[in-house]
Amino acid sequence: MVRLEEVEPGKTICRLRGAADAEPLTPYERRVLAEVRRKAVDGVVPTDALTTGPEDASRGWHRAFGKEVISDAQGRGLTRDRWPGWLVSLLGVGPFAIGGLLYLSSVVGGESLDHLVPALAGAAAIAGIVLLGVAAGHLSRSTAQLPTGAGKDTTARCLALREHLREDEQLADLSPAAVQLWGRHFAYAGVMGVAPTAVALLPFGTEDDNGAWSRFGGRWRRVRVGYPRGWPPGWGKHPAFATFLAVLWGAAAVAALYGLTRAAQSAADPITSTDPLFDRDQLDWIGRGALVLTVPAALVLLWAIVLLVRAVPDFWRTRKIRGDLVRARRRRQIFQSSSNNNPRYWYYLALDDGTRRRIRSWRVRRELYDAHSQGDTVTALYTPNLGYVRGTGTAWS
């Protein structure tokens, strides 16, 4: 179905060969083949690009893959569910049974002078309800398996094959293309951990946020993606809002600098009062402190000036770009508590037009982020300095 070719040391490509129906495939094999076809350009995809998406998407892909493998193993009579359905159902009914007993006891239990025992029993019952609910939920989601009799026989043969493959030490260093010589035995070596190098070169896992493969222009190329947060100033902001921030913070910095320098000058003046609030040593320290604080105020002023210089030209300057959306990510905003139950995010889109190896992704509005999926070919209108995306596609805002 596919051919793995080593084009240079450490670099392998996957080339599609026959049609998808050339031979019968299991559901999980079809899933892998569909992922390869989705990423291929002219039937070829670098093995480095064989990933299954961002963390959440990758987790879902592998969960579905695992369920298909389990279904196939059960269909062959090799495994069975570790936790039978009747046990999960019993645990699910348990909390309701305990709740019913609590209600009945409150109705017909009568009165008691000693309230400690009923209170302890009620607390234990509530704890039991919680524990049974958690256990039932965990077991209902579990895909753990146990081998059947036939599965144990197959396991014994697989363990014997693994020991045989381990005797050949060169398997550990071979690239994926060695499957052309070794055939199915090399696939078994990969599954059994005997061919770690080949497995590492065929990731099929979570995407690297910063390293991406782009196929814009009809050929694969490697790009690096960055996600600006604090620098450059005002990245992703509307020019009007960035100008407002620059003026606001610049004015605050100028006021702070003026106040601090006046405080330092006042502290350096001779003491004329007969009963001064501070002595000379204290005034010297106040003056030094005021001068030290002028440094961060000056940095804020410099930041405001840089932001103003970058924002003003973007009122009338825009550029149009067309390329492949190589990364779509969200990042939690800075200065938020880790325990925040309602976190806010920044949304990033990285577009490759085939001209750069390093891409600075745009910070965009939520609606633009939701309007596109990674891998789409997108046309965008943006400002060159702040990277503010005015719109995508044919609808400009």
Image (cartoon, helix red, strand yellow):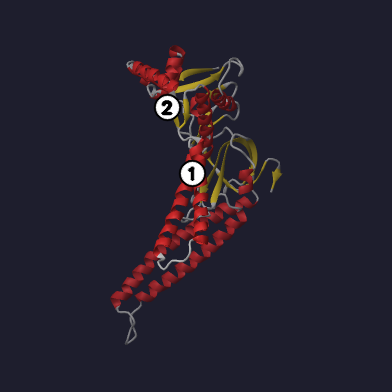
Identify the secondary structure beneath mark 1.
helix
Residue at (35%, 71%) from the top-left corner? 287
The image shows residue 338 at horizontal and vertical percentages of 45, 54
Callout 2, which amino acid? Ala
Residue 18: in sight, yes or no? Answer: yes
Which residue is label 1 attached to? Answer: 91
Q: Residue furthest bottom?
A: 274
Q: In the drawing, does residue 41 fall left or right of residue 150?
A: right
- Residue 27: name its quadrant: top right
**Marks 1 and 2: which is nearer the front?**
1
Give the class, few, some or many, for how many residues have Cα within 10 Å of label 1's Cα (few <14, many ≥20).
many
Residue at (56%, 44%) from the top-left corner? 348
Give the class, few, some or many, for how many residues have Cα within 10 Å of label 2's Cα (few <14, many ≥20).
some
Q: Quadrant of the N terminus?
A: top right
Identify the secondary structure beneath mark 2.
helix
Which residue is label 2 attached to? Answer: 200
